[in-house]
Image (cartoon, rainbow, N blue to C red):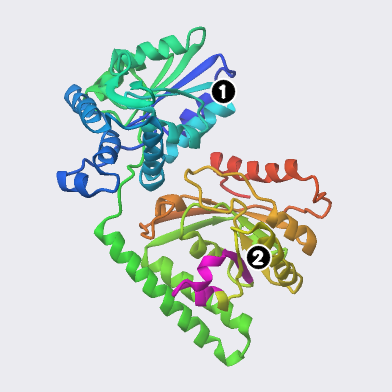
């Protein structure tokens, strides 16, 4: 058994450059298998049988019979569909469900290979409609899948050529990687034995019993990834308790400081008590390093990477007072969060109107100059992967105008506590690294692309090499 840290270290110390290929199997290696669907679920799932077949094919391991049944389902349900229709369905499936099955450990391995300059290849016996959206989010350009025959842009339901199953998958990689050194292959099933045999450094991921035995005999490294399971009944109950704690804690906090008749004292108490009660109810612990950077200098613009809906609970808890935020306009009318956010001074912006959004940021600069810090996600939206998306420049412009530093707050694992669009939280530990402040006073507002990208890269480097201290 090996560790992820050992695997990443081996990649970094090994040969570098595009002549080295790193091959990742898809189902069970990059994404966890989805639970098998019953007939009723197939009928009533939005998207019907086509969506059910698309999702149902993503399995961990699987036998020859399982794959044969998948191809039969493709022939039955996808014949007559246009390629554009299936592409849209694949992207919809990714945004609704597949992204939540993406292994964070696989993301880290892929990024390690990309940073080493390797040619990364994602291979699957499935179709591009299932695999391509994942590849795009991971920044993988080379995708090998079972091709489907078309006639005038319409699927016939039959494979176009040999399906990439067992030896067919290995043959496709050999053909594509002609002239390259196949340095690394990652797979989870004994059906991928021919694929693993191509690599100088084969690695098995949570192998099935047959592959586990072979890996042991050949002394192949074995990695264990955390299963990407749907929330349990206990998770739902804890989340309900968390929302009750949020409301109750907010009321207690305001009442606790009401004698001061100072709005900011009540707002700070609201955030402290509400976030403390919520995290306790959902059984989430925070493991923070660099906490001293959250206390000074103040005021500041705190930047956090956005992974889940519960980040708005985690960040205020870590920063602990004298902080407000920026939220999208729609939240102002939310029956639960709207009143709480308005009370703590959140500025609401209309993201659909760029000019209106810019104009609404004027009061934020005044807020900072008055001594209150701001917490904002420069990505502008929650990420589909553990990685960090492109940064918008608004937060940096605000910091420059207000004459305050920016302070990165890096969150790890919050996307595992709650998937991107899920309101349901699981228990666990969220790691938080509060990095030293960054002076932006000398930045040129008209030319700061490189500096902003440098800050974004600082987030990603921290996620890839989590520090033990700052």
Q: Earlier in the sequence, mark 2 or mark 1?
A: 1
Judge by depth and name the residue closer to the eye, 62 or 205: 62
Is residue 260 depicted above or below 106 in this figure? Answer: below
Identify the residue at horizontal 51%, vertical 63% (top origin).
312
Magenta span of residues: 323-341
Judge by depth and name the residue closer to the eye, 280 or 453: 453
Gap in angstroms between the C-alphas marked 2 and 1:
40 Å
Is residue 223 depicted above or below 250 in this figure? Answer: above
Whether residue 239 is in magenta: the answer is no
Q: Can residue 209 be seen at all in this image of the molecule?
A: no
Position in image of residue 64 (x %, y %)? 19, 22
Q: Which residue is mark 2?
A: 374
Position in image of residue 26 (x %, y %)? 37, 29
Position in image of residue 28 (x %, y %)? 32, 32
Q: Residues within 10 Å of mark 1 (few under 14, many from 20)?
A: few
Identify the residue at horizontal 35%, vertical 27% (top origin).
154
Position in image of residue 206 (x %, y %)? 31, 32
When asked about the image quadrant of residue 262, the answer is: bottom right
Image side of residue 283 versus residue 10, left or right: left
Residue closest to the far front? 152
Q: Tell me the tag on residue 13.
A: 1
Asked if marks 2 and 1 touch (Cβ < 8 Å), the reply is: no
């Amino acid at each position: 058994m090996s560790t992820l840290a050992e695997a990443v270290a081996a990649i970094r110390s090994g040969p570098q450059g595009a002549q080295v290929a790193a091959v990742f199997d898809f189902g069970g290696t990059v994404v966890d298998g989805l639970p098998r669907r019953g007939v009723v679920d197939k009928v009533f799932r939005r998207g019907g049988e086509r969506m059910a077949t698309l999702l149902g094919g993503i399995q961990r391991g699987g036998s020859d019979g399982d794959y044969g049944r998948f191809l039969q389902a493709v022939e039955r349900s996808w014949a007559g569909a246009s390629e554009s229709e299936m592409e849209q369905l694949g992207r919809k499936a990714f945004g609704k469900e597949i992204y939540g099955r993406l292994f964070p450990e696989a993301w880290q391995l892929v990024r390690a290979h990309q940073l080493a300059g390797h040619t990364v290849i994602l291979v699957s016996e499935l179709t591009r409609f299932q695999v391509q959206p994942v590849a795009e989010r991971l920044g993988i350009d080379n995708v090998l899948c079972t091709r489907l025959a078309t006639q005038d842009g319409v699927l016939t339901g039959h494979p176009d050529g040999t399906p990439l199953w067992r030896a067919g998958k290995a043959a496709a990689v050999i053909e594509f990687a002609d002239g390259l050194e196949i340095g690394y292959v990652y797979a989870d099933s004994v059906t991928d034995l021919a694929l693993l045999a191509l690599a100088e450094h084969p690695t098995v991921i949570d192998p099935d019993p047959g592959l586990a035995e072979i890996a042991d005999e050949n002394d192949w490294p074995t990695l264990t990834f955390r299963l990407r399971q749907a929330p349990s009944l206990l998770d739902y109950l804890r989340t309900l308790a968390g929302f009750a704690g949020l409301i109750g804690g907010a009321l207690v906090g305001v009442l606790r400081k009401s004698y001061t008749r100072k709005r900011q004292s009540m707002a700070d108490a609201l955030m402290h008590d509400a976030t403390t009660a919520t995290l306790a109810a959902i059984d989430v612990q925070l493991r923070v390093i660099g906490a001293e950077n959250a206390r000074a200098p103040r005021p500041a613009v705190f930047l956090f990477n956005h992974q889940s809906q519960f980040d708005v609970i985690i960040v205020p808890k870590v920063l602990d007072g004298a902080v407000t935020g920026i939220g999208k306009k729609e939240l102002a009318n939310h029956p639960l969060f709207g009143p709480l956010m308005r009370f703590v001074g959140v500025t609401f912006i209309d993201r659909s109107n760029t000019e209106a959004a810019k104009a609404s940021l004027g009061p934020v600069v005044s807020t900072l100059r008055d001594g209150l810090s701001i917490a904002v996600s420069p990505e502008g939206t929650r990420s589909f992967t553990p990685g960090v998306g492109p940064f918008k420049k608004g937060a940096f412009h605000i910091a420059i105008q207000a004459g305050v530093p920016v302070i990165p707050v890096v969150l790890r694992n919050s996307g595992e506590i709650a998937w991107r669009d899920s309101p349901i939280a699981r228990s666990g530990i969220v790691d938080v690294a509060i990095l030293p402040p960054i002076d932006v006073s000398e930045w040129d507002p008209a030319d700061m692309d490189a500096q902003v990208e440098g800050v974004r890269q600082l987030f990603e480097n921290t996620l890839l090499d989590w520090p033990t201290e700052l």
